[in-house]
Image (spheres, rainbow, N blue to C red):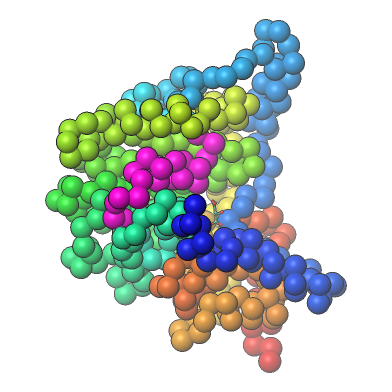
């Protein structure tokens, strides 16, 4: 596939790892704190871990063994997602269980192929544009998002595209779109006959009841939007791997045919469903007990975000995000984000993510994640306070 040669040397996070290794080779005594990749750090809560273990052990018995499942996922899990995540506003057979949001984004890109135009927020999760480049998509429109436009694209100046990728709570800026903003987005997609791919991987961090957790809270969205969700940041499943995609029955192509029917055909051809162990875990996440447990986990990471945000603000920084979102976005006017990354490494021995890895509009920024052990977050805060004014 010659399109792969169009991609930058390596994906963002392996590049950061490489820099980390280089630093450690030169400073073997260094004790680095990673606030870089957004990877969960806290144990999977007990009732959920137990269900993963029970199901796994069951596989070793005649009664508990199961082989291939439905490609779309276990019906009971699809029902629970429709009920607990969407309060029944979507139907179980509009939910497709997967091995994670990133993998589903890749399959959605296969679904739409290369003869399309797309719009992506800038900065954005790299998979939207890089996965599209791999498909051979030529027309990629960037929608700059910065403090001056409240991190919401100026839709008046965005040309029509077939797909619009949108992520809220946003990775990397931590910005959370209001209901009014999402209404604008849905009206824009309707007017342009575009399909929104709404990435809601961080929806559980929304604590403000006025902010939509799903695009389907907006009237008319089922006709124009696909939503991709994840258990990764919801239940610490970044390693277990489990996510879902909602494709509403109402979503049609211009010729009136069903997008869901094509998705069904595609996933049953190139995907064999999420692991049955992960799906058993997903069911436990959405049980009453599991929901309570994961809510504490969400609060834990939000408290981390608050600690980092307050520390940085106390040091005079302007910090975006970190409220209703697990990412913090820090601006350093006029500086290059890899230089800022290096400064944080040298001065504080803290790994961050350079904003330019998420697009050109990220160039004066770094991203900090709130995923971390509390002792590391407190140590990071202490280092920031201690060394900020060192020369
Ligand atoms: C991130 O750090 O942006 C995320 O962890 C990436 C991902 O979820 O794949």
Q: Position of residue 353 (x, y in %)?
A: 57, 67
Nearer the observer, 139 or 86: 139
- State whether residue 212 appears in this view: no
Q: Say if residue 388 shows up in the picture.
A: yes
Q: Quadrant of residue 352?
A: bottom right
Q: Is residue 299 left or right of residue 133?
A: right
State which image quarter holds ligand 1. bottom right
Which percent across, then down, holds residue 330?
A: 50, 73
Is residue 106 on the magenta stretch?
A: yes
Nearer to us in this view, 232 or 97: 97
Q: Examine the image and state in which quarter residue 241 appears.
A: top right
Residue found at x 52% / y 66%: 8
Quick check: is 387 in the magenta stretch?
no
Say left or right for 211 vs 339: left
Position of 85 relative to 375 (above/below): above
Q: Farthest residue in the bottom direction?
A: 391
Going 75% across and 72% down the picture, which residue do you hit?
22
- Spot occupied by residue 85 in the image (x, y as percentages of width and height): 42, 34
- Residue at 70%, 80% (x, y): give it: 346
The region drawn magenta spans 98-118
**Foreground residue among 110 and 279:** 110
């Amino acid at each position: 596939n010659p399109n792969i040669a169009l991609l930058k040397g390596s994906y963002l996070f392996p590049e950061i790892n490489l820099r980390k290794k280089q630093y450690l080779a030169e400073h073997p005594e260094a004790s680095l704190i990673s606030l870089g990749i957004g990877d969960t750090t806290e144990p999977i809560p007990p009732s959920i871990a137990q269900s993963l273990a029970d199901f796994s052990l069951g596989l070793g018995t005649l009664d508990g063994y199961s082989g291939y499942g439905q490609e779309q996922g276990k019906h009971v899990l699809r029902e629970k997602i429709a009920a607990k995540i969407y309060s029944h506003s979507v139907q179980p057979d509009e939910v497709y269980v997967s091995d994670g949001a990133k993998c589903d984004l890749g399959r959605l890109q296969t679904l739409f192929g290369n003869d399309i135009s797309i719009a992506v927020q800038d900065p954005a999760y790299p998979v939207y544009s890089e996965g599209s480049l791999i498909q051979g998509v030529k027309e990629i429109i960037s929608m700059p998002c910065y403090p001056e436009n409240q991190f919401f694209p100026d839709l008046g100046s965005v040309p029509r595209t077939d797909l619009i990728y949108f992520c809220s709570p946003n990775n990397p800026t931590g910005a959370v779109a209001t209901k009014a903003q999402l209404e604008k987005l849905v009206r824009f997609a309707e007017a342009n006959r575009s399909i929104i791919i709404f990435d809601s991987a961080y929806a559980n961090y929304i604590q403000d009841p006025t902010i939509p957790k799903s695009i389907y809270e907006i009237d008319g969205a089922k006709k124009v939007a696909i939503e991709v969700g994840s258990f990764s940041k919801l239940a610490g499943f970044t390693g277990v791997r489990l996510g879902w995609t909602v494709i509403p029955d109402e979503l049609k192509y211009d010729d009136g045919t069903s997008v869901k029917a094509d998705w069904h055909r595609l996933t049953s051809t190139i995907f064999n469903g999420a692991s049955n162990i992960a799906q058993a875990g997903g069911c436990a996440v959405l049980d009453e007990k599991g929901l309570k447990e994961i809510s504490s986990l969400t609060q834990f990471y939000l408290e981390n975000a608050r600690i980092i945000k307050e520390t940085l603000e106390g040091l005079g920084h302007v910090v975006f995000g970190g409220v209703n979102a697990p990412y913090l976005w820090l601006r350093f006017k006029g500086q290059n984000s890899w230089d800022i990354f290096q400064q944080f490494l040298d001065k504080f021995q803290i790994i961050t993510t350079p904003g330019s890895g998420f697009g050109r509009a990220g160039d004066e920024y770094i991203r900090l994640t709130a995923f971390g052990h509390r002792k590391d977050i407190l140590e990071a805060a202490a280092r920031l306070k201690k060394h900020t004014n060192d020369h």
